[in-house]
Amino acid sequence: MTAVTDRQKLQYIAARAADARVNVELETEGMTLNIGPQHPATHGTLRIVARLDGEQVIAAEPIAGYMHRGYEKITEVRTYAQVTTVVNRIDWLGSFANEVPFILAAERLMGVEAPPRATWIRTILFEMSRIANLILFLGDMGVQLGAITPVFFAFRDREFVLDQIERVTGGRFHPNFDRIGGLKDDLPKGWLEDTKRVMDKVRTFCDEIDDLLMGSEVFQERTRGIGVIPPDVAMQYGLSGANARASGIDWDLRRDNCIGLAYPEVDWKVWTHPDGDSFARFWVRLQEVREAASIIDQLADGVPSGPIMAKVPRIIKVPAGEAWISTENPLGEMGYYVVSQGDLTPFRLKIRSASFNNVSITPWLLRGVYVPDIVTILASLYFILGDIDR
Amino acid sequence: MADDTSTDTTEGAVDDVPEVDEAREGIVARFRDALGDAVVATEIQPGLDTWIRVRPDAWRAAAETARHQLGARYFAFVSVIDWLPSPFGRSMDSAVDLELARRAGDEAAVNAAEMQHGVTGGDTRFQVFGRVASVGRPGEYWGVTLKADVPDDLTIDSWVPVYAGADWHEREAWEMFGVTFTGHPGLRNMYLPSDFEGHPLRKDFPLLARMVKPWPGIVDVEPMPGDDSPAESSDEEAAS
C-alpha cells in the first residue's frame, strides 16, 4: 500500500485552515453538538459532546459510563471460576478472548500449565473470536460511509464463525469455556474440517470487502489522511492492537510476548501501515482477518492429542501473589492484573481493556476535524462499549 | 510477602537462586541509577515479570525515567489498590469472617486478617500502580509494573504530563478510590453520576447486592471427602 502523499496531507490541512478563516470572517457562532448516548455510529452508549465552529470541531469530549457495570468490584466477590462468566461481557463480540488472559494469570499464580492440546484449541478459539469481532468492523465501517451492502455480508459470514464457536462451547457470544488448567470440553467430531471450510468463507468475505470498499473513491476520500495518529501519540495514549499497528508501530503481543498460546508454532505475519489514518486502521484489520484465517488453518492441521485439562483441585484457591498477563485481543491489548491473597476470590482485579485507552485519544484526535469525519474516525478506532465501561 | 519463585534483589539474594534474568536485572539497575534511593523495593520473577516500588515523591520521576531514559514509551494503565481487608467478612471476599471472629473473641483470626501487602511490600493502605512497556522493536519487548505508596493525605503526582493517556485512568482511580492526582488537568467523574457519594472500589464500600442477600461464601466451600487440609478447617472454626 502506498502512503498518503505529503501533497494530500497538505491539501487537507490547507482546507481546514481556509475553513477556519471563513469562520472568522463570517463571525460564525459556536454551537454544541451532542452525539449520543443512543446513536448508531457509537456502537452502544458512548456520548460525544462536540463544540463546533462552523463545520469544524473545536473540542470534543467523549462521555462514557452509561454502561458501567462495576466488574472490578463484582469480581472481588466472585470465585475464580465465576469470574470468566463476568469478563465474557467486556468485549462481547470476541468473548472468548476476554477469558484467556484472566485464566492465564490465574494459572501463573497457581503454577499450573494447560496441556498442549488445550493450548492449541485455546489459540484456535481465540483467533475465531478475533475473526467474529473484526468481520463486524469491516462491515460496519462501510455503513458509516453510506455503503449498506458490506454489513449484510458481515452478518452473513460472521454467523458461520459463530456457529463453529457454538458447536464447541455451546454459546454464540458468551462461551465461558476456558478453565484454569485447560478447557471445559474437547472438540466435537469433524469440527476442525468444518472450521477450515469456514475459513475459506472468511477469506472470500475479505476479498469481497476488498472489492467493495478498497477501490471505492468515496471510501478513499473519506478515510485517507483523516484522523491521523502519529506513533508517539499513539503510544502515550496506550493505543494498542490494530490502532497502534496502523500508526506504524510494529508490535503484536502474539509475537512479542506470547504466553500460554500456540502462536510460535505457526507461520504468520504482523501487518503494519505507516499512515496512521482511518484507512490504515481499516486496512490493517482487513489483513489481520486474513492472517487469523491462515493461523487457524495451520493450527487445525496440527492439534496435538492428549488431555485437555491439567490436574487442578476441585476448589480453586489461588496462592497469594500478583500477576499481570495481557494478550493481543481483537481490540488491542487486554490485560488483567490479578492480586490474590490466597482466597477463593481475587483480592483485586484490575481490568485493562483496550477500548478504554483507544477512545481516550478522541479529545486529541477530534480537534479540528469536520463533523462528518467524527463518525468515520470513531468507526475506524473501533471500540466496544462494554470494553470501555467494564 | 514474597512469592517463593521470586528473587528479591534488594536483599542481595540473587546467589541463592540459580535462575537470573539478566535483561530484567538490567532494567532494574537502570532505574536504580536514575532514581537512586527513591527505589524502595524491587522484585523480579525470572522470565516472567518485574516490579519496582518507588517513594511517593518519585512517582512521576519514575515514569519520566521509564519513558525518556529506558524508552518505555507505551503506557498500559494506572490504577490503585486498596489493601484494607474487607470489613464485611464472609459476605465479601475474606476467608476469615471478621465479624464472627470478633464476636467469638478469636484474636488470632482477627490479627490474621490484617493488611497484607503484595509483591514489593508497602506501608500504606492505598498504593498506586501502573504498567509501562517498551514496544515497537520486534524481539525487544519488555514491560514493568511501577508501584508507590499513597501518603495519608491521599494525593500523589499525576502521570498525565509524562503519559497523556493517564488522563482517563487517573480520573477513574480518583472517583473509585478517592486518590487525588496533582497536576491532572481535570479530575471529573468518569463513570459515576456527579453527585455520587463514596468511592466504590474501596474495600470498606459495601456492595449492596451482597448486603441484601449474603453470599454463601465460605459456607459454600465444603472440604472434599478425604481432604481435610488445615486451612479449610480453620476457616470453619472461624465461621462456626
Image (spheres, coloured by chain):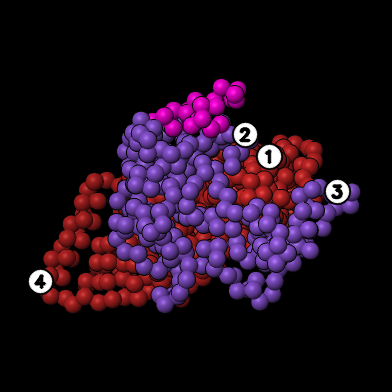
- Frontmost residue, A344 versus A174: A344
Where residue B227 is drawn, which disc sits there?
A: 3
Residue depicted at 27% across the width and 62% down the height: A367
On the same chain, marks 2 and 3? The answer is yes
Say whether residue B55 is visible.
yes
- 3D distance between C-alphas at marks 2 and 1: 10 Å
Mark 1 vs mark 3: in front: 3
Q: Closer to the N terminus: mark 2 or mark 3?
A: 2
Mark 1 vs mark 4: in front: 1
Please tell me how crowded label 4 is: few (under 14), some (14-19), or many (20+) other residues with Cα within 10 Å.
few
Residue depicted at 45% across the width and 75% down the height: B196
Give the letter of the chain under mark 1.
A
Q: Main secondary structure of the magenta part?
A: helix
Rendered red, the chain in question is A
Residue A110, x across and y down, in percent: 68, 43
- 3D distance between C-alphas at marks 2 and 4: 69 Å
- Amino acid type of the residue tagged 2 in the rendering: Thr
Where residue B5 is drawn, which disc sits there?
A: 2
What residue is pinned by disc 1? A111
**In the image, residue A238 lies in the stretch drawn in magenta:** no
Tell whether label 4 touches label 2 (CB within 8 Å): no
Image: A19 above or below B148: below
On the same chain, marks 1 and 3? The answer is no
- Amino acid type of the residue tagged 1 in the rendering: Gly
- Frontmost residue, A34 versus A137: A34
On the same chain, marks 2 and 4? The answer is no
- What range of the chain is rendered magenta? B7-30
Q: Secondary structure at mark 3?
A: loop
**In the image, residue B8 lies in the stretch drawn in magenta:** yes
- Amino acid type of the residue tagged 4 in the rendering: Glu
